[in-house]
């Protein structure tokens, strides 16, 4: 559905037309004006009117309707098409959810198509309307404002994930006694969140860099290059944060596996020590359980106490030996 539709003239919002086809013609005729239409998960029928009026390329339209695209920048004859993947951090479940934003830029128009719950553009539009100097750059100002908001959100999510990673790190390096399987599951779940985040930030670097250079990119004036350079700088920071999270997670996973191996070795040593201590009385009892007629100390008054003391002394000696060596 159409969330918002407005004409911007000389950096100011003028009106919200009901018929965007007439509005586009009006914006083109007035000069220094453009039409911005915002849509949220439009159906094929709803988007068909926009496609016909703005002459959008069918391949880009297909991508905008089906979503599930990687961040990219494509240039067609009559329009520019860009895909971004905003991310949303959910503190209740400590998960990262990625949405999709598609932008079409052309002669005096900007069309934004949003999929998923993340990155509503109402706040972006209001902030941009408070900066008429940027709005005067035309449809490229919409591309800049949306890209800047998405990348700034990347940095915020990276900070939230850093806090979660520190908590996970403290859990891994805490004294023994925690649930190893639960910790391993948390590490792998966290790694999947970082991977989802990386799929959003990594591929976006090349398109933003191209916009910052503004080389052969239509509908992006030369004066907007500093704005996109700023977005590129922030995106570099976000990508560095994501790569740092991924490296730390790999190190934590390695440390956790090493701790698991050490703990398993400790358990095996304890089991071996107790088995060795149990083996001595078992052996003696097994010998005296045999039905031979002539065995030493069978008829001795002190035979039974002597054997019991021997077994107890041997077990106690083994216990002290294993304790001294750290096996128990």
Image (cartoon, rainbow, N blue to C red):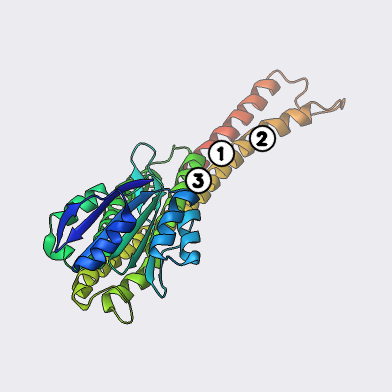
Name the foreground residue: 115 vs 172.
115
Residue that sits furthest to the top in the current view: 301
Where does the N terminus fall, quadrant-wise? Answer: top left
Which mark is in front, 2 or 3? 3
**Direction from residue 179 to residue 123 in the image, left or right:** left
- Mark 1 surroundings within 10 Å by alpha-carbon count, few (fewer than 14), some (14 through 19), many (20 or more): some
Q: What secondary structure is found at the residue carrying circle 3? A: helix
Residue 242 in sight from this viewpoint: yes
Please give the name of the residue rendered at 48% of the width and 39% of the height, measured from the top-left corner. Answer: 182
User: What residue is pinned by disc 3?
Assistant: 263
- Do residues under tags 2 and 1 come within 8 Å of each other at their CB atoms? yes
Q: CA distance from mark 2 to mark 1?
A: 10 Å
Where does residue 28 sit, x and y in percent of width and height? 25, 67
Q: What secondary structure is found at the residue carrying circle 1? A: helix
Q: Looking at the image, tell me whether mark 2 or mark 1 is earlier in sequence order.
A: 2
**Direction from residue 293 to residue 84 in the image, left or right:** left
Please give the name of the residue rendered at 45% of the width and 44% of the height, measured from the top-left corner. Answer: 186
User: What residue is pinned by disc 2?
Assistant: 280
- Do residues under tags 2 and 3 come within 8 Å of each other at their CB atoms? no
């Amino acid at each position: 559905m159409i969330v918002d539709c407005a004409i911007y003239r000389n950096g100011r919002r003028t009106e919200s037309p009901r018929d965007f086809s007439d509005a586009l013609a009006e914006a083109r005729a007035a000069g220094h004006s453009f039409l911005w239409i915002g849509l949220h998960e439009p159906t094929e029928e709803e988007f068909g009117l926009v496609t016909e009026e703005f002459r959008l390329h069918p391949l880009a339209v297909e991508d905008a309707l089906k979503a599930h695209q990687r961040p990219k920048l494509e240039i067609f004859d009559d329009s520019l098409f860009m895909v971004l993947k905003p991310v949303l951090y959910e503190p209740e479940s400590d998960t990262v959810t990625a949405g999709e934003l598609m932008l079409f830029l052309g002669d005096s128009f900007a069309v934004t198509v949003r999929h998923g719950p993340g990155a509503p553009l109402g706040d972006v539009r209001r902030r941009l309307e408070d900066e008429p100097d940027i709005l005067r750059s035309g449809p490229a100002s919409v591309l800049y404002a949306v890209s800047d908001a998405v990348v700034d959100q990347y940095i915020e999510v990276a900070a939230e994930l850093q806090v979660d990673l520190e908590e996970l790190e403290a859990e891994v390096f805490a004294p023994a006694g925690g649930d190893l399987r639960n910790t391993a599951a948390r590490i792998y779940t966290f790694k999947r969140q970082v991977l989802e985040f990386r799929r959003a930030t990594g591929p976006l670097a090349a398109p933003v860099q191209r916009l910052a250079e503004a080389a052969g990119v239509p509908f992006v004036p030369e004066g907007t290059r500093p704005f996109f350079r700023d977005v590129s700088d922030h995106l570099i920071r976000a990508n560095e944060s994501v790569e740092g999270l991924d490296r730390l997670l790999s190190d934590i996973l390695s440390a956790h596996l090493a701790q698991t191996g050490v703990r398993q070795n400790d358990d095996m040593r304890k089991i071996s020590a107790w088995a060795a201590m149990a083996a001595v009385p078992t052996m003696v009892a097994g010998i005296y359980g045999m039905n031979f007629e002539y065995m030493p100390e069978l008829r001795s008054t002190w035979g039974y106490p002597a054997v019991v003391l021997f077994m107890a002394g041997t077990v106690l000696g083994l216990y002290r030996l294993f304790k001294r060596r750290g096996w128990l």
